[in-house]
Amino acid sequence: MNSQTKVAGVILAGGRARRMNNQDKGLVSFKGRPMLSYALAALVPVVDCVFINANRNIDQYRQFGWPVISDQTDSFDGPLAGILSAMIHADVDVLVVMPCDSPLIKTQHLQKLLLTRAENNADVAVAFDGARQHPVFLALKTTLQASLQDYLAAGQRKVADWLAQHNPVLVDFSNEPEIFSNINTMVELSLLEETNRFS
């Protein structure tokens, strides 16, 4: 990591998780640990500071030892609202974004996002699995804050549409697309635990 470039990370845990009986996904256990702890383990080594974006169970999230930030509104506006909140709070040049519900993501994957963005001097680097983008796995410049505020203020919510405005560089993870497995239901949780018993 370039020592001149300050980097913050944000873990998105601010959703309602309707398909998971409205449980708070970051606090749900995967193989005996809260899912948020996997995201922290991946993120902490590559950033100068971490923010946890959560809109409920704030005190429980604070117990992980990092600042907890909520969206600027209380209307659960999706991942972009969490990204904007991190941009507002983080006095850094670059932000790394990941969700709380993808426990197979490791430090080297986030490092690759950062390096690819830096090498291309891109505004945004987004993960790509060979077939599709994963728009909540990002490294992006915080100078995009005004653009994001305008986009949300106009009532827009789709992450991919906003990213497309900023010529994102795609970061190729086609050799291991399974790392993007995310958990939206209790069935998915059980399946992922079973398939990763030995890892």
Image (tube, rainbow, N blue to C red):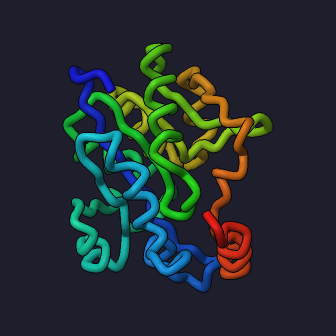
The N terminus appears in which quarter of the rendering? top left
Could you tell whether 138 is left or right of 68 in the image? right
Could you tell whether 51 is left or right of 24 in the image? left
Could you tell whether 170 is left or right of 142 in the image? right
Residue at x-position 61% and y-position 63%: 199
x and y, in percent, of residue 197 in the image: 66, 72
Residue at x-position 35% and y-position 45%: 9
Q: In which quarter of the image is residue 184?
A: bottom right
20 versus 10 height, above or below = below
Residue at x-position 48% and y-position 62%: 100
Check the image and name the residue furthest to the front: 198
x and y, in percent, of residue 176 in the image: 70, 43
Between 49 and 142, the one lying in front of the other is 49
Check the image and name the residue furthest to the bottom: 21
18 versus 158 height, above or below = below
Residue at x-position 23% and y-position 61%: 66
Q: In which quarter of the image is residue 53?
A: bottom left
x and y, in percent, of residue 41 in the image: 39, 57
Check the image and name the residue furthest to the top: 120
Between 11 and 162, the one lying in front of the other is 11
Between 164 and 67, the one lying in front of the other is 67
x and y, in percent, of residue 131 in the image: 79, 37
Mark count: 0
